[in-house]
Amino acid sequence: MEPKPEITVLVSAAAVQLTFGLRSYHLPFFKNIYILPDAYQTKEFNELVVGHVSVKGIFISWKYFKMGFENDKDGVNTALHEMACTSSPKPIKRVWN
């Protein structure tokens, strides 16, 4: 996916939305954010995913990133979800099937 200025601005805005007003507003445990065009498959999961966090960084589907901000009533926002997972260095266990 080719870099576009709006991607940088909107990803940064999502991080600010998550951390606004906090004394500790950095997300220090993950330095890289990878934006992919659509849902994708990873080695960790045997299904398509729209975002995940690994030791390599934060991975988010751009399609689902945008969808998360289109409806603020449904409670589904891939960008905020994945960035919230980065607020701690502890591994997050998958608890659903």
Image (cartoon, rainbow, N blue to C red):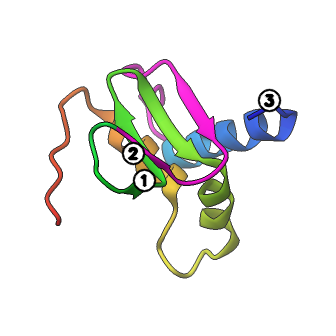
As drawn, is 4 to the left or to the right of 97?
right
Q: From the top left corner, tell me how far across and down residue 89 is, in percent.
A: 24, 26
Mark linked to residue 81: 1
Q: Is residue 90 magenta?
A: no
**Callout 3: SS:** loop
Frontmost of labels 2 and 3 is 3
Q: From the top left corner, tell me how far across and down residue 34 is, in percent.
A: 57, 31
Q: Are marks 2 and 3 in contact (CB under 8 Å)?
A: no
**Callout 1: SS:** helix
Q: In which quarter of the image is residue 95?
A: bottom left
Q: Quadrant of residue 48?
A: bottom left
Neighbor class of circle 1 (other Cα within 10 Å; few <14, some 14-19, many 20+) is some
Mark linked to residue 84: 2
**Callout 2: SS:** helix
The amino acid beneath tag 2 is: Ala
Residue wearing tag 3: 3
Q: Is residue 65 above or below residue 11?
A: below
